[in-house]
Amino acid sequence: KKGGIDDNNKKCTMGNIQCGGPLTEDCLGDTDIRYDSDGSDNFVDQSTVWEKKQGYFKLELYSYGPDYRPLETRPIGPLGSITTFPYQGFENFTIDETRIYQT
């Protein structure tokens, strides 16, 4: 072949010059995972940060009014009252390949 990428998608050739030789730089597939045909698109495979981010979490949220003061317990009619400071909640953070689901 006169130019392009070989069957392994690892070496780019231009005429008779190949990457990774004594006079050229390393091939992009060897140094940058974005050009590696064996590289994974899965977020978790790319960085351990994503693996640690997955899971089911308990949250504690705080609500503030326009005057920057915490919102207190307030009545909601015949049902009683609601506590808005702090608010307890839960979050499920799931990563599936290249998709992130947050519920």
Image (cartoon, rainbow, N blue to C red):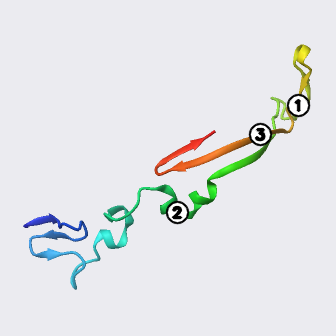
- For residue 93, side relative to residue 67 (left or right): left
Q: Earlier in the sequence, mark 2 or mark 1?
A: 2
The residue under label 1 is 83
Answer with the quarter of the image where residue 25 lies.
bottom left
Answer with the quarter of the image where residue 63 lies.
top right
The residue under label 3 is 89
The residue lying toward the viewer, choosing from 26 and 65, is: 26
Q: Residues within 10 Å of mark 2 (few under 14, many from 20)?
A: few
Expressed as whole percent of the image width and height from the top left, the position of residue 77 reads 89, 14
Q: How far apart are the alpha carbons under marks 1 and 3? A: 12 Å
Q: Quick one: quadrant of the C terminus?
A: top right
Q: Are marks 1 and 3 in contact (CB under 8 Å)?
A: no
Residue plotted at (34% across, 65% down): 38
Q: Amino acid at mark 1?
A: Thr
Q: How far apart are the alpha carbons under marks 3 and 2? A: 28 Å
Q: Are marks 2 and 1 in contact (CB under 8 Å)?
A: no
Q: Are marks 3 and 2 in contact (CB under 8 Å)?
A: no
Q: How far apart are the alpha carbons under marks 2 and 1? A: 39 Å
Residue plotted at (9% across, 75% down): 16
The residue under label 2 is 47
Secondary structure at numbered mark 2: loop
